[in-house]
Amino acid sequence: MDAVFKALADPGRRRLLDRLFAEGGLTLRQLCEPMGMSRQAVAQHLGVLEKANLVSTVWRGREKHHYLNPVPIHEIYDRWVMKFERRGLKALYQLKKRLEGEAYD
Amino acid sequence: MTRTEFVYVTYIAATQQRIWDAIVRPEFTRQYWGHENLSDWKPGSRWEHRPAEGGPAKLVGQVIESLPPRRLVITWADPSDTGADPSRVTFELEPIEDMVKLTVTHDRLVPGSDMQRGIENGWPRVLSSLKSFLETGKPLPTWAPAKH
């Protein structure tokens, strides 16, 4: 679980996950295009995400395809969010939303 | 037609056989999935996914490949979608050190379909509940209604 939190702690890696959420099965080359990061940086981030099991991969021929794997995020949700949510996190979230005029989502 | 796919992975501290049984035996699936998976799991046989509390099947399909306890390939369709080209689910169980890597590949999905939305929401919950069930004996409230 530490690996998941560490992997999620980087904005570039979170952007990669967003990209894979929008479209699964992308190759390293396809992921590099809109990221504004070097190929090496994207490859390194993907390595961290894969190690944390947030990204699953499938080899087809010589191409490695990447998929978002949200299972560990769900495990964190079950362990660290759902439990506390029942006791008022929801109320806090709604207060925050009201104070911020629904701008925050 | 363009089809889309999802690849889900979880590492479970259990044997391949226990994980296999947890997928194909209704007395286990009902505990962490809230449904019973019913079939003799022989290639060509029909399988059904029925609510544990009874009622008609929510999903139906055919067993394509069955290599216990390593690999199971089934088709996966809404029972009302007769005639449509069904989606496909592949379970692969690979021992890695003292754990088993369970990969669930759900492919041949129609992009933007209700089925795609359903499985995207469903698999992470089911797999996380399966892991908890096998490792701690306690399933998660998998199908508890979302509170908003």
Image: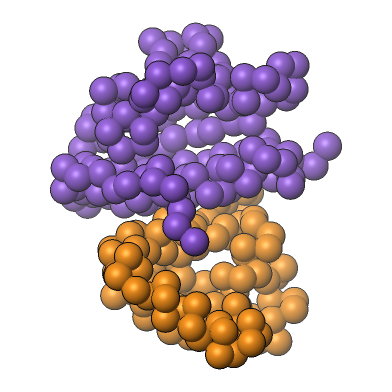
Residue at x 64%, y 43% (from the top left corner): B116
State the colouring used for the structure image: by chain
Q: Quadrant of residue A21?
A: bottom right
In this view of the protein, which residue sits in the foreground, B85 or B16?
A: B85
One can see residue A44 in this view: no
Residue B117 x, y percent position in the rendering:
63, 46
A56 relative position to A79: left or right: right
Q: Quadrant of residue B102?
A: top left
Q: Quadrant of residue A32?
A: bottom right
Residue A69 x, y percent position in the rendering:
49, 58
From what the image shows, is residue B27 above or below residue B43? below
B51 relative position to B6: left or right: left
Residue at x 51%, y 19% (from the top left corner): B57
A8 relative position to B31: left or right: right
In this view of the protein, which residue sits in the foreground, B58 or B18?
A: B58
The C terminus of chain A - image quarter: bottom right
Q: What chain is the orange one? A: A
In this view of the protein, which residue sits in the foreground, B36 or B90?
A: B36
Residue at x 50%, y 34% (from the top left corner): B90
Which residue of the protein is positioned furthest toward the right in this rendering? B1
Residue at x 80%, y 42% (from the top left corner): B2
Residue A19 x, y percent position in the rendering:
65, 69
One can see residue B139 in this view: yes
The N terminus of chain A - image quarter: bottom left
Q: What chain is the purple one? A: B
Residue A42 x, y percent position in the rendering:
59, 79
From what the image shows, is residue B54 above or below residue A44? above
From what the image shows, is residue A98 above or below residue A22? below
In this view of the protein, which residue sits in the foreground, B59 or A37?
A: B59
